[in-house]
Image: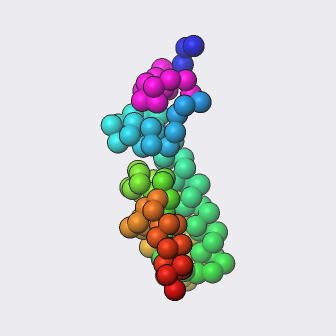
């Protein structure tokens, strides 16, 4: 099967057809500078930032922590999210700007939280 030139690196990283591409493959390709993978993170980050801006307009948090497997991409995801947040936040001059950070526990956060709840 032929793939668009832009997708070749992702297909090769996954070791097969598009159905085998997983998040870690995209992250690895983006870190290696693959333009398609970087573009995918930029688009995802843009949507994430817009959603955080909507949430901030309602609950006005000081901090948003992004976790899970996708957060392992770090600034590949978070920088576009921060840019989008600043562009989309309503009443920007009247509210403090929140901080968007990567979760320290990454994809393990759910298990750590469940273990902590069980302990108490």
* Residue under the image location 63 percent in, 72 percent down: 55
* Residue under the image location 46 percent in, 39 percent down: 26
Q: Position of residue 21 (x, y in %)?
A: 52, 34
Is 14 included in the stretch rendered in magenta? yes
Q: Is residue 63 left or right of residue 89?
A: left
User: Residue 15 lies in what quarter of the image?
Assistant: top left
Q: Position of residue 109 (x, y in %)?
A: 47, 67
* Residue under the image location 54 percent in, 31 percent down: 20
**Image quarter hosting the N terminus:** top right
* Residue under the image location 63 percent in, 76 percent down: 57
Residue 112 higher or lower than 5, as above or below:
below
Residue 61 higher or lower than 87, as above or below:
below
Q: Nearer the viewer, residue 98 or 26?
A: 26
Q: Is residue 27 visible?
A: yes
Residue 72 higher or lower than 35, as above or below:
below
Residue 58 higher or lower than 33, as above or below:
below
């Amino acid at each position: 099967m032929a793939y668009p030139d832009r997708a070749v690196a992702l297909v090769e990283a996954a070791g097969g057809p598009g159905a085998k591409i997983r998040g870690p493959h995209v992250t690895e390709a983006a870190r290696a500078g693959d333009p398609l993978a970087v573009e995918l993170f930029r688009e995802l980050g843009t949507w994430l930032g817009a959603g955080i801006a909507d949430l901030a307009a309602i609950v006005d948090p000081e901090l948003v922590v992004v976790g899970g497997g996708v957060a392992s991409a770090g600034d590949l995801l978070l920088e576009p999210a921060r840019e989008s947040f600043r562009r989309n936040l309503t009443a920007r001059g009247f509210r403090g700007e929140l901080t968007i950070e990567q979760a320290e526990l990454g994809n393990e956060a759910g298990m750590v939280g469940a273990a902590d709840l069980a302990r108490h």
